[in-house]
Each structure stands twice: as structure tokens, then as C-alpha cells.
Amino acid sequence: MKCLYKQWKCRYIVPMQKIILQVNDLESSQRLDKYVADKHSDISRSYIQKLAKDGYVKVNGDTAKASFLIREGDEISLVIKEKNIDIKPKDIPLNVIFENEDILIINKPANLVVHQGAHGAHAEDSLVNALLYYLKDNLSSINGVKRPGIIHRLDKDTSGLLLIAKNNEAHAYLADLFMNKQIKKEYIALVKGRLEHFKGIIKAPIGRDSNDRKKMGIVSENAGKMAETHYEIADQFNDSTLVKVNLITGRTHQIRVHFASIGHPVIGDGTYGDKSINKKYKNEYGLNRQFLHAKKLTFRMPGNKKETAFEADLSKDLNKVIKELARL
């Protein structure tokens, strides 16, 4: 990936990108466009339909319509050609937890989107803009021009640890660890109500909400992917519980969807949360976003393969809420 700086602007000339998907037995009988959109949340269903119309989507080597019903064993391939994208490096302060020649680990603040939206949506205040300023060309190119160096993501209003790859070798290694569940991810969340059990496991498939593609939900096994969340109570208050959460899988909005599904949504969550308790915590404790923080990452480092743990303390806004709750 080459970046040519001219008046602090990067222009990447994007080649065609080929995506190949294999359908398993739980995914049969879906429309092709819906299946691909669910697999790749940053590719819209309408864009997939356009690709299919132009002959860029194939099933088992033959061009296919967007309405094609997929079957177990089908191999789906699609070619995406993105337009040239202008990305401006921007001097956005980064809270660097660790850095070496392979990786960068930051403590991402809330209200910072990780990368620009798909297919033209623009955001000059994204983490990618900050990374281009801070690291210049020292970012992996595996995930393309919109997401250089990005291996995993955090929601805009979730704070905490984010792992960045500075070269393609490190990116491939770490992506493999994520895929094989060899990176331990620990979060801190404040959820509505008092949980009954000290420890618990939430295991349920997550997929796109059939009525709102921007939302996720608990779905049938053939309509989504199985997700597993482990939790342990860290503290309890009058109307809320502070939990330590370990993600076994990494589905979109997993913690938020899983806790909402058992009647204990994350406090401050405007999408899956409870409006009345969100309003209370905003008015009484100044909480203006979801109480969710990626606290700890543990994995074997690229290079020496030594298992290492990194931690990030709660941000000031979340600490303030806990301190005031503890006084009650």
C-alpha cells in the first residue's frame, strides 16, 4: 500500500478485491445478497445487488442473481472495485499503551469511530485518520485502504484497547489468533438490574435484525452466527451490576445484544438499552454513552510468541459513575 503525501492528503489507488465465501449447512436457503451482506457488514445489500447485476458475483463459478438461494457447499465469489479514496491524515491525540516494530496498542476514547463508512461515507475524525498521521506508511494493507492496520474494531461509543498491525506479517499472524480464539478479550460493562448468579454464560446466535439492518439481534442458528459471552460480577448497586466480561467469540455488538437478550442491557446503550435507566444515569451521573470498556487483551506477541497482557483503566466518565454509585 503506497501513500503519496500532497498537502497532507493520501490517495490510494484501489485494485479489485476478491472475496470468497463457503456456505455451511446452517446457512442454506438464504438469498445470496442477504447472506453476503450479513457476512460483510460494511458491504450494503444494495451494493451486492449492483455487483450481481454487473456480473461480479458468482456461485460455483457461474454468474448468479442477487435473489439466488444458496445451498450447503456453494462457493460464492464476488469482485469489488472501489473508487479512489482520499484520506486525510489528522493530528488526533492517541493514548498509546504499547508500540514496537510490529504492533501498536491504543486506549481508544469513546466518540471516536474506527474507520470511514463503507462505499463513500466520510469521516475525517476517525481512528484511521489519526493512524495515518501518527504512523504514516507503517500500517498493514491487508484490510484495504479504508482500514489500514485494523485487525478488530470497537463501537464508536466503546472505549478501551485496540490492536493495530504495522505490517502485513504481523496482521496475518494476529488475524489468525483472533480467528482461532487465541486472543483473550476482557471488557467491563455496567448493566441494568442485579444479576442473580455470580458467574454466567450467554450463548445464542447473533445476526442482522430483519427489520433494521443497522441493528443486530438474537436469531435462529441458520440466520446468524453462534456467539458466546462469559461474565462475572465485579460489583452490584441498587439498580445496576458491574460485570467483567470475556468474549469467546467476537460478533458485532455481541456484549450489547447478549445482555439485552437476558433483560440486563448495557446502561447508556441507545440502540439496545432501556430508555428510562439511560435517562436516569445521564441526568444523575453524567453518563452520555454506553458503559462499555475493553479493559484487557492477552495474546502471544508476533515475533517472540511470548504471551503478554495489556490493560487500560476505565476512562474518567465511567470512573465517575462508579465512584458516585459506590457512595449510595
Image (cartoon, rainbow, N blue to C red):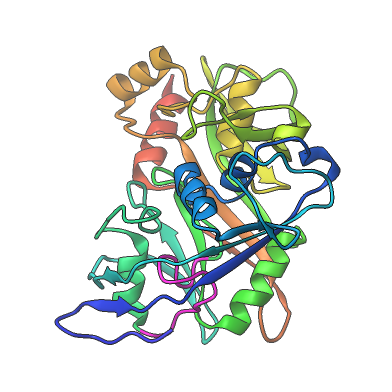
Query: Residue 224 location in percent, x, y?
Result: 69, 37
x and y percent of residue 279 in the render? 34, 18
Judging depth in this view, the residue of 235 and 255 nearest the camera is 255
Q: Residue at x 66, y 34 (%)?
A: 206
- Asked if one can make out residue 202 in the rendered structure from this viewpoint, the answer is no
Report the magenta stretch's main SS: loop
Q: Quadrant of the C terminus?
A: top left
Magenta stretch holds residue 140: yes
In the displayed structure, 62 sits above or below 287; it is below
Image quadrant assignment for residue 127: bottom left
Q: From the image, which quarter does the N terminus lie in?
A: bottom left
When the figure is inspected, residue 309 is found, relative to residue 286, above or below; the finding is below
Relative to 327, is 24 on the left or the right?
right
- How many marks do you count on the picture? 0
Residue 33 image position (x, y, % from top left): 58, 43
Residue 144 left/right relative to 234: left
The single residue placed furthest to the left in the displayed view is: 7
Q: Nearer the viewer, residue 9 or 155?
A: 9
Quarter of the view holding residue 223: top right
Task: Give percent across and percent down for residue 52.
Answer: 54, 52
**Picture layout, residue 229 above or below residue 306:** above
